[in-house]
Amino acid sequence: QVQLAESGGGLVQPGGSLTLSCAASGTTFSGDVWRWYRQAPGKERELVAGVTSGGIINYSDSVQDRFTISRDNRKNMMWLQMNNLKPEDTAVYYCNARRQWAPTYNYWGQGIQVTVSS
């Protein structure tokens, strides 16, 4: 059974930092893209950052220069280092692993809450 599990969320003050982790298990991951998404109350899920198995990285404009995504292919782990957090970063954060060519897959974690508030 394939599982993606997020950890590291919680409550932090504006300007603070958190690191989210995503641990994957249950299959062989390769040739894919792992991404962090988030969904704030009343809003659509949005892409935060992504990293390919080859190490190509992209960020949304709203987190560029504040968040850092990383990935360890051998450990099947992904991280999101979040610095200078703002109240508008408050959301449920999800990790996602997607492969677009055979064998395709699209796996999601259950999500983890990040709350930025004083």
Image: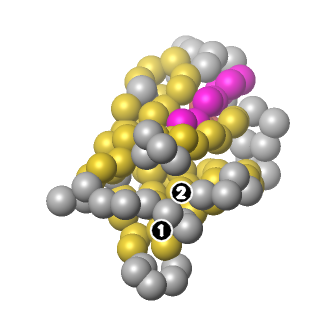
Helix, strand or loop under label 1:
strand
Compared to 7, does 45 lie above or below?
Answer: below
Say above or below: 24 vs 34: above
1 or 2: tag closer to the N-terminus? 2
**Three-letter code for the amino acid on which mark 2 is drawn:** Trp
Residue at x-position 49% and y-position 73% = 99
Crowdedness of circle 1 by 10 Å Cα count: few (<14), some, many (20+)? some
Q: Which residue is mark 1?
A: 98
| Observer-nearest of 94 and 53 | 53
Residue beneath label 2, please?
A: 34
Q: Is residue 87 above or below residue 96?
A: above
Which residue is located at x 72 percent, y 42 percent? 63
**Residue range (magenta):** 79-85
Residue 13 within the segment the image draws in magenta:
no
The amino acid type of the residue labelled 1 equals Arg
Residue 21 visible here: yes
Toward the bottom, the furthest residue is 102
Question: Is 34 in front, or is 118?
Answer: 34
